[in-house]
DNA sequence: CTAGGACCTCGACATTTGTAGAGGTCAAGG
DNA sequence: CCTTGACCTCTACAAATGTCGAGGTCCTAG
């Protein structure tokens, strides 16, 4: 237990690539294997194939799934998440995640602000929302 | 018994019957008539029926649709929006909208915060998201 | 009275987001 | 060798979110 987590920062990390199987990823992310397949097929996860044609994922796979789930609950479609994650390199480091995080969060806040603005007009417009968009 | 029983087409000002037709609502909200029907059938809009079995909406209908669209983009399902709007009285006044707005916005911000928290761990955790095992 | 427009219902279809099963492959172990 | 488990592909189905068309009703105009 608690085997060392290989620090793969610079130097030579030419050891075996951290290739997780679909089952491991599913387990880690707490979703069914079918869901992992679905995400991989839709650009949320990048997968390579091993000698036996099985999908191999890098360590970021389960993170991507977790983030994707939260991103969906904030209004993004799988397509949009796939496009965004498509800009991530394999085995992204914290710096790579930062750009993604910024986009994700500020887009979400933008939409919340839109909603709030609309709602504010409803609350304060003495009558109803005649002024929301027209006039 | 006076002449106010006549349904007016041109939205006469003053105390006109607050009964908008589905076509008017669709026009106001900028969505197809079919969408209005869909929302009405799913609790986003409250509709009564007139003598000819046609849906009649109050003035809040197009507002509800606009808000619903924004709410969806912030992660709510139609079902959830319907449940929330179900607490609104017919012809809600700004005060009624305020409670809805509060729920809507704070729920949305909660989800954005969840996302951000997850993302923060990815950015700052020197390693990857092994610690994200919440949510 | 007839024509038209606006609505109605109901069922089909389309897309998104998954889930489930059938049937095939591959590698390891008894 | 044969079985088993994990995977693979492909197809089907399911729920959510709409959209469209067919066929029918009703009201108002001409």
Image (spheres, coloured by chain):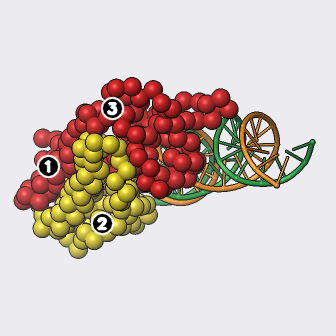
Chain colours: A red, B yellow, C orange, D green
The answer to whether mark 3 and mark 2 are in CB contact below 8 A is: no
Q: Is residue B66 visible?
A: no
Q: Give the number of the disc on residue B5.
A: none
Residue indicated by mark 3: A9
Q: Is residue A41 above or below residue A62?
A: above
Tell me the chain of label 1: A
Q: Residue A96: x percent and y percent?
A: 29, 32
Residue indicated by mark 1: A117
Q: Residue C30: x percent and y percent?
A: 82, 55
Q: Give the number of the disc on residue B84.
A: 2
- Callout 3 crowding tier (Cα within 10 Å): few <14, some 14–19, many ≥20: few
Q: Is residue D24 above or below residue B32?
A: below
Identify the image quadrant of residue C7.
Answer: bottom left
Identity of the residue drawn at 39% across and 25% down: A12
Q: CA distance from mark 3 to mark 1?
A: 45 Å
Identity of the residue drawn at 28% across and 37% down: A94
């Amino acid at each position: 237990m608690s085997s060392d987590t290989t620090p793969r920062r610079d130097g030579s990390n030419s050891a075996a690539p951290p290739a997780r199987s679909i089952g491991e990823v599913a387990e880690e992310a707490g979703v069914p294997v079918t869901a992992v397949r679905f995400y991989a097929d839709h650009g949320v996860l990048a997968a390579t194939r091993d000698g036996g044609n099985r999908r191999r994922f890098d360590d970021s796979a389960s993170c991507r799934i977790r983030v994707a789930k939260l991103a969906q609950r904030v209004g993004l479609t799988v397509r949009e998440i796939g496009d965004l994650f498509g800009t991530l390199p394999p085995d992204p480091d914290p710096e790579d995640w930062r750009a993604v995080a910024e986009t994700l969060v500020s887009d979400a806040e933008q939409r919340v602000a839109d909603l709030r603005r609309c709602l504010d007009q409803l609350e304060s417009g003495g009558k109803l929302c005649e002024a929301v968009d027209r006039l």
